[in-house]
Amino acid sequence: MANYYSRSPPPLQHPVPTHPTYIPDPPSTPVSPQGYQRYTSSPPTAVPPQSVYAQAAYAPQFQPQGHASQPHFQPIPGPQGPGIPDIASAWGVNPATAQFGMQLGQSAVAAGQEYVQKNLGGLIPLSSLKNHFNVSNHYVMHKLRILLFPWRHGPWTRKVRRSEQGTTEWQSPRDDVNSPDLYIPLMAMVTYVLLSAFTAGLQSRFDPRILGVSTWKAILVVLLDFLFVKLGCYFLNIQGSSPVTDLIAYGGYKFVGVIVTLLAGLLGSGTWLYLLVFVYAFCSTALFMLRSLRSVVLPDIVNTPATVGTVTHSQRSRRVTFLFLVAMSQILYMGVLARV
């Protein structure tokens, strides 16, 4: 037994870390009363800040338990810092550098927002864009009914309101059913793209590229319609014409008639039903455009926010002709969209 206590147990092997940096060997303690030596970790020494977190996951600490000790790993606490500096220190980045980077990023975002507002704010005002999505369920149902049965609706005059600055402006779609919106055109456009792919799939000719082709075709049709109306207003010298968002909204309502035509084609009742529904959808869309764009081409002085002046007989005749051409051009746009 004396020989047993006189011999020391074999030294413990330290685990080798995956990414070793520098781990000091633990010194031995004085001989215990039982006659054997115990090993424990020495007090933590000063380590450079760059290697603190590199050693955190691999610093072993040994505690005696009876005649043997099992190593366990505890991360060495690093410098405490609130928010970003603490996270930056965990990745070995200087907190001051991280704070400077955050400030630089915020400045870049603010400069980008200012640039967009300065260069695109005049073309598409963000406040106007937000106002065109201010709709309700009642408005959407009522608007769809007007698009499909425009001869049953009246009056078509848009309502105005007085703003806080004392100027008059159009009411939002939620408060005026005759006001154009962008919610229905956007949803109708997405539905048209999906319905085109579904129709192609039923005809055993589906291809993933149909989604992209249908999307670009829809966007191109809306842009052509917008440019035609905008250029007509420019050459006819129409003062106080509607903004870009109004004209895009009016051009996007044609997707509702196209969707009804495609649904009629899915019934499989023959070509005659498809053509009949297409002609009806075109007539409804053309009548809707005639009534709605009248406030743009032939603005009413009483109900228009901006003073547009008087219109002579010759000017009125040319504007009526242009308005009729805009309505008739819908058959070309709808014919291109209906072919999937």
Image (cartoon, rainbow, N blue to C red):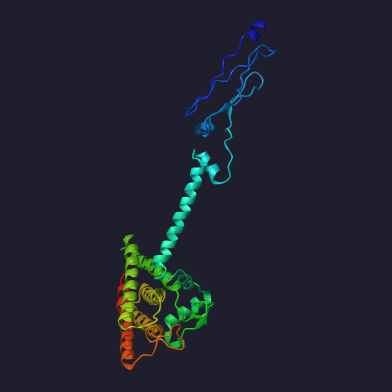
The residue depicted at 56 percent of the width and 18 percent of the height is: 12
Q: Nearer the viewer, residue 159 or 66?
A: 159
Q: Position of residue 138 (x, y in %)?
A: 53, 77
- Direction from residue 129 to residue 338 in the image, left or right: left
Quadrant, the N terminus: top right
Q: Is residue 23 above or below residue 300?
A: above
The residue depicted at 57 percent of the width and 37 percent of the height is: 79
Q: Is residue 206 above or below residue 39?
A: below
- The single residue placed furthest to the right in the displayed view is 33
Quadrant, the C terminus: bottom left
Q: Is residue 72 above or below residue 289?
A: above
Q: Nearer the viewer, residue 298 or 340?
A: 298
Q: Position of residue 114 (x, y in %)?
A: 44, 62
Count the labels in the image: 0
- Direction from residue 142 to residue 324 in the image, left or right: left
Q: Position of residue 300 (x, y in %)?
A: 43, 88
Q: Quadrant of residue 44?
A: top right
- Direction from residue 248 to residue 97 in the image, left or right: right
Q: Position of residue 271 (x, y in %)?
A: 31, 77
Question: Does the rendering let one see residue 270?
Answer: no
Q: Nearer the viewer, residue 236 or 165?
A: 165
Q: Quadrant of residue 151?
A: bottom left
- The single residue placed furthest to the top in the displayed view is 3
Question: Does the rendering let one see residue 315?
Answer: yes
Q: Nearer the viewer, residue 1 or 299?
A: 299
